[in-house]
Image: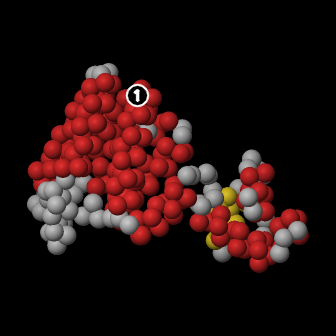
Amino acid sequence: MSEFLSYLAANDREDDRIPPLAELSQKLGVSIAILREQMEVARALGLVEVKPKTGIRRLPYTFKPAVKQSLTYAISTDQAYFSLYADLRKHIEQVYWIEAVPLLTPKDHDLLRSFIQRAKDKLNAVPAQIPHTEHREFHLAFYRRLNNPFVLGLLETYWELYEEVGLNVFTDYNYLQKVWKYHEVIVDAICNGDLLAGSQALSDHMDLLQQRPKTSTNQKFE
C-alpha cells in the first residue's frame, strides 16, 4: 500500500479527522506532492473526503467505489461486461438469500411491502412511471442486515451501473407488472416463513431479465 493508505489502515480506530498533508509529510517522510497523489487514490476508493472547511476526513469503509471504478471502465470498453456482472449479481443474491432473509425484522417486511405499493402507484399513474428506485431498494433491503460490506458493495454497484447502461429508462409495461407480481410472491413467502418458496420466486424473477423486451430508446415512460 502507499504511505497514505498505510497510515489510514494503521490509524483506523482513531479520530476520523486526518492531519493536514504538510503535517503528514513530516510524520511519514514523504513529499506533499506524493501524498497528494496518494490521497486522490484514497478519495477515488471512497476512503476519505476533502472539504475546504473540514479538511481531510476518513469515511466508513465501503467496497462499492473500487468496484464501480473498475466496472465502469470495463463497460466503457465493452457493454457485454455488464451482462457478465449481472450474472454474478444473480448468483450473489441467490447464494446469500437463506443467510440474509432470516435477519429481516417485521419492520423490514413492512418496508418491502411499502416498496411494492409505491411501485404499483407509479405503474398505475397517468402517465405511468418506472419504479426504478423502488426496484433497487427492494432488492438491496434483503441484504442490508448481513453486515458484509463486500456483498452490499457488489450489489449496490450493479444497480448504479444498471442505470448507466440504460436499463432503468424503458421497458414493456406488461413486463414491469410481471416483475412486481414476482416481488409480491417473494414478500408473501418471507412473511409466511417459507424461504424456499421465496428463493424460487427470486430465481424465477431474475430469469425475467433475459426475457426483457427489446425496444427503442426513443420510447419511455415519464
The quadrant holding residue 192 is top left
**Image position of 125 (left or right of 19):** left
Q: How is the image coloured?
A: secondary structure
Q: Residue at x 47, y 49 (%)?
A: 154
**Image position of 153 (left or right of 34):** left
| Residue 57 image position (x, y, % from top left) | 68, 62
The amino acid marked with disc number 1 is Ile
| Residue 129 image position (x, y, % from top left) | 19, 59
Establish if 130 lies above or below 152. below
Establish if 7 lies above or below 145. below
Farthest bottom residue in view: 33
Q: How many marks?
A: 1
Q: What residue is pinned by disc 1?
A: 98
Between 99 and 78, the one lying in front of the other is: 78
Q: Residue at x 16, y 73 (%)?
A: 218
The quadrant holding residue 104 is top left
Q: Helix, strand or loop at disc 1?
A: helix
